[in-house]
Amino acid sequence: MKTLIFYFFLQFIFLDLVAQSKYIKVLDNTTKRPIEYCTITCSNDAKGGFTNIDGLLKITDLKDCASITVNTIGYKKRIVDLTKLQLGLDTLYCLLTKDTIQLNEIKITPNKDKAKKVFYNLGHFKAKNEIYNRTGDIGRTDALYIPNLNKSLNIKIEKLLYSIDATESAKVRLHIYTSSNLKTPGTPLINDDLVIKVEKGAKKIVADVSKYNLIMPEDGLFISLQWLGEIKAMNKTKNINPIIKSHWDKDFNSVTFFKFLDGNWEKRYFKSKNGNIIPNFGISVIEYSK
């Protein structure tokens, strides 16, 4: 009799453990194709991760995560109630709808064919006195504010520039945002998910965004970089402990924010006689004039 009771007790524990582990599969609502590198976080915490090539992410500790936020660039964010999972169902299918936000077209006053073109960089891509700055765990995003000092609306953004040291091959997500009223990263300037692979040994990232016809906002912008790591088979993610090349800077215009996964932006500041640690990010631009 004791053996029988012990057997049922073990079965109960096993079923309870199984119930705490589910898969989320994220699909495009129209095409039904899996969405890779979609960010999934517990709505009451910063815990979470990214979907793999099949759109899957394993969620554990469901008792502490009653609902999740499913979010990726180019789609409408969703909050999903995990308590509605049917008993015995190990996968929840989450459909995301394309976001139809309208981004501003480029508006350059002078005739581009006759206008004088000046090519230059903004930001800190080639800053001197580089230091190696490890960014921590996968899922962290660093964003640098780049001001529009002349408030010119005739500056077209050509390329996004990042100085890095890739100790391992990995995927990264690039983006640029407007500057909000609170001087934090605001709305995206590009509605595509810019995920690229960085090869081991790479010292820089240069991403051509000229096809989007973007102008430099009057209030400046934020350029960001998020390390996604490598998602292998069986949904295992390797933490590569990535390095962003940075420098000490005392310029009050040099403002850096960071966040983990889909959490809130936090200002990064070091109280040091050397100033603040600023990532070596920048943009390549063309300025048009008469």
Image (cartoon, helix red, strand yellow):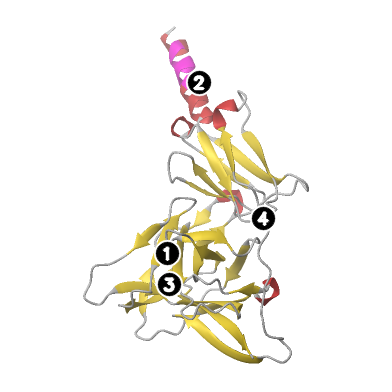
- For the residue pair 128 and 118, the one nearer the viewer reads as 118
Depth check: 108 or 246 in front? 108
- Which three-letter amino acid code belongs to the residue tagged 4? Ile
Q: Around disc 3, counting alpha carbons within 10 Å, would you say few (fewer than 14), some (14 to 19), or many (20 or more)?
A: many
Amino acid on which the number 3 mark rests in the picture: Ile
Q: Position of residue 164 (x, y in %)?
A: 47, 75
Q: Is residue 201 left or right of residue 31?
A: left
Between the C-alphas of marks 4 and 2, the distance is 50 Å
Give how far across and how far down residue 97 sits, in percent: 70, 46
> Mark 2, mark 1: which one is toward the viewer?
1
Q: Which of the two discs, 2 and 1, labels the residue nearer the N terminus?
A: 2
**Nearest to N terminus: mark 4 or mark 3:** 4
Residue on which the image places disc 1: 241
For disc 3, the marked residue is 244
In percent of the image, x 47 and y 11: which residue is there?
Answer: 4
Please determine whether, in this image, residue 215 is positioned above or below residue 82. below
Q: Which of disc 4 and disc 1 is earlier in sequence? A: 4
x 53%, y 72%: residue: 218
Q: In the displayed structure, would residue 59 be above or below residue 31? A: above
Q: Is residue 83 above or below residue 248?
A: above
Q: Whole-Å distance between the Cαs marked 2 and 1?
A: 40 Å
Name the residue tied to disc 4. Answer: 101
| Circles 1 and 4: CB atoms closer than 8 Å | no
Tell me the amino acid under the disc marked 1.
Asn
Query: How far apart are labels 4 and 3 at the CA level?
Result: 31 Å
Label 4's element? Answer: loop
The residue drawn where x is 52% and y is 24% is 15
Q: Are marks 4 and 3 in contact (CB under 8 Å)?
A: no
